[in-house]
Image (spheres, helix red, strand yellow):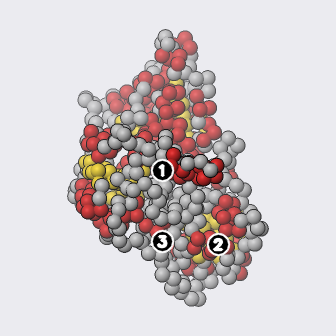
Amino acid sequence: MSTDERAPLRRDEPTGPASAGAGWGSDVLAEMLRRLGLPYLALNPGASYRGLHDSLVNHLGNAAPQMLLCLHEESAVALAHGYAKASDRPMGAVLHSNVGLMHASMSVFNAWCDRVPMLLLGATGPWDAAKRRPWIDWIHTCSDQGALVRDYTKWDNQPASVPAACEALMRAMQLTQTAPRAPTYVNLDAALQEARLDAVPALPDPARHAPPPAVAPAAEALEAALALLRGAQRPVLLAGRCSRSAQGWRERVALAEALNARVLTDQKMAAAFPTDHPLHAGPPGNFLSPESTAALREADVVLALDWTDTAGTLRQAWGDAPVDAKVIHVSPDAHLHRGWSHDYQALPPADVYLLCEPDAVVPLLLPRLPAPTRPPPHRAPYQEPQALGDVVSLRALAVAFNEAAAGQPVCLTRVPLGWHGSYRHFRDPLDYLGLEGGGGVGAGPGLTIGAALALRDSGRLPVAIMGDGDFLMGVTALWTACHYGIPCLMLVANNRSFFNDEMHQERVAKERGRPVENKWIGQRIDEPDIDLAAMARAQGAHGIGPVTDVAQLRQAVAEGLQAVRDGRVVVVDVRVQPGYDANPSGPASQKR
């Protein structure tokens, strides 16, 4: 099925015409959401926002924004997160009172750490205690509900009137789209939603409250950066958080070629530079590969483009020795720093500090640098693995996927911890979307479905390769994809274990002289075995597997890709051999 032939996104259509006038507080709020251009609201229903829910259905007709029903709040936020990762645009998620917000908090933290835009709508109350129903309204009301997520949202508000709520929604949308991007949260009093209006307030024009253009660097700082780059003999470019813009991608390539700079990318972040380019130094990973470490250690100037952990990366290359390279640090992230979460990482040295986004700096640098006087070095890019091997491993899964997807536009929405950066090349900003940001297991299914929603008209096939723990924690997100018709493929590298923690237990046992053979206890997911394909089929998806031998693997992956092209949601249960079959470029992650 081609993109043009794809079935439209399912929309549950209300009976009867939409209400003619905005007679209730929530009607005005719903109209404000429409004016703000939010395409979708992912939600799990709850009585605290029953007024808004009614207005979305019976006043707006469940369109612009359209509601997307999810079976868990964590999936609703993960879906909005994946949409933003693929599109660079926010969508909304609605969370029921304090309990729904607590359910969603892990996904909110992921989105915060991943620096993506998102509008979160909450509800409480009624705040006026005299209007509360016995028991239930009391346990669903907090003195300061925003405090539950305030340390990992950019801004929150609980407006006390309909006009104030309209302004809060506009401010939240403006702030979430202003760099550095992060979720914003607006908490709507149930009584405010359900209030009958004597007069409908005039709605403000969102165009007059749009986010500002990207901030440009200070002229003197830009001149200082140019002076360092012009004099560099062995520059290294760290391509970090960048937009999905094709123009930005081309400009980064042109900058690297103008400088003849080696380039490093990070598996935690989305594709930012072609990994098969001769200037790409080594396979991306969650930690530096030996090739990348060597390239960085030789650098005389390091240009860090919103790199997630510049200080930690420099420490991997230089150890405890002073960093003798000059560092140009480009990032707006300091505007988001807080004391509660340390996701800002260690404080990096910076000889020149440009407090803005990479996409605002690179176009200013390019015209001021001399044209390349020599072509990039003819280094052969690292090779993707070619042979399946004799066992079903993560590497074999990568080979089978690369073969089946050859020549097709694919967006890899995530990879598991054991994935080695050499397994697949990325040649486009939508080839790979990075990890989940905050290390929260269970994000994979929701992120993938949200990305697939954003990519519906792009011609790209959204594919996730994820671990079984990630899949199992977020599995109910599949129902949302099946119900609304959001095709995507999930290849589950199922080692029947929280294997990363087995590796941690092995290290501890060796350090303490205790039996390594016990590392599996409290980690293995078996006895009884879980049929992941059956869990997918139970929700309406096409389930394949379990795939237990190499002979099945090619056929299963090819069948899965074809089913996605036919408009299906697909899960392939691939029983991979426990263990890392290639060095994942560094110590085991601290996440589960």
| For the residues bearing labels 2 and 3, Cβ distance under 8 angstroms | no
Separation (CA) of disc 3 from disc 1: 30 Å
Residue beneath the point at 25% across and 48% down: 542
Residue beneath the point at 55% across and 59% down: 286
**Front one among 145 and 406:** 406
Residue on which disc 2 sits: 296
Residue type, label 2: Leu
Q: Secondary structure at mark 3?
A: loop
Q: Could you say where residue 284 lies in the image, as x and y percent from the top left?
A: 52, 66
Question: In which quarter of the view is residue 442 placed?
Answer: top left
Q: Earlier in the sequence, mark 3 or mark 1?
A: 3
Residue beneath the point at 62% across and 70% down: 293
Residue on which disc 1 sits: 499
Q: Mark 2, residues whose alpha carbon is within 10 Å: few (<14), some, or many (≥20)?
A: many
Residue on which disc 3 sits: 274
Mark 2 or 3, which is nearer the eye? 2
**Front one among 386 and 567:** 386
Q: Earlier in the sequence, mark 2 or mark 3?
A: 3
